[in-house]
Image (cartoon, grey):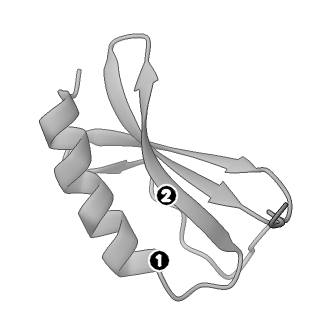
């Protein structure tokens, strides 16, 4: 179980690893059943992207959400 503070620290690690990848359109912290996780939103599948399942003991979840457009 990861605390909110642990998830926030892990989010910063994920951001530094993935911030320049074109398929990543969002990184945040999300509640999960036993604590918190880092959530990565992708615009499309990214076969060239190494997708970790956890960072520093904090789960990392991935979701393809499509393109995000400004309203």
- Residue 13 on image: x %, y %: 26, 67
Q: Residue at x 52, y 88 (%)?
A: 20
**Residue 55 - label:** none
Q: Residue at x 80, y 51 (%)?
A: 65
Query: Of residues 26 and 56, which is closer to you in this image?
Result: 26
Query: Of residues 52 and 12, which is closer to you in this image?
Result: 12
Q: Residue at x 71, y 62 (%)?
A: 42
**Relative side of 38 to 69, left or right:** left
Question: Residue 66's quadrant in the figure?
Answer: bottom right
| Mark 2 neighbour density, 10 Å: few (under 14) some (14–19) many (20 or more) | many
Circle 2 residue: 27
**Relative side of 29 to 8, left or right:** right
Contact (CB < 8 A) between labels 1 and 2?
A: yes
Placement of 29 over or under 27, stated as above or below: above
Placement of 24 over or under 33, stated as above or below: below
Tell me which numbered mark, 1 or 2, is placed earlier along the sequence: 1
Q: Residue at x 65, y 68 (%)?
A: 25
Question: Residue 69's quadrant in the figure?
Answer: bottom right
Question: Residue 47's quadrant in the figure?
Answer: bottom right
| Mark 1 neighbour density, 10 Å: few (under 14) some (14–19) many (20 or more) | some
Placement of 38 over or under 69, stated as above or below: above
> Which-is-in-front pick, marks 1 and 2?
2
Considering the numbered disc 2 on the image, is that residue within a helix, a strand or a loop?
Answer: strand
Tell me the CA gap for discs 1 and 2: 9 Å
Circle 1 residue: 18
Indicate the quadrant containing the N terminus: top left, top right, bottom left or bottom right: top left
- Residue 71 on image: x %, y %: 85, 60
């Amino acid at each position: 179980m990861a605390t909110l503070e642990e998830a926030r620290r892990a989010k910063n690690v994920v951001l530094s690893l993935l911030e320049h990848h074109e398929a990543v359109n969002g990184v945040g912290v999300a509640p999960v059943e036993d604590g918190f996780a880092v959530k990565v939103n992708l615009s499309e599948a990214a076969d060239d992207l190494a997708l970790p399942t956890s960072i520093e003991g904090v789960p990392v979840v991935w979701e393809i959400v499509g393109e995000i457009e400004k309203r």
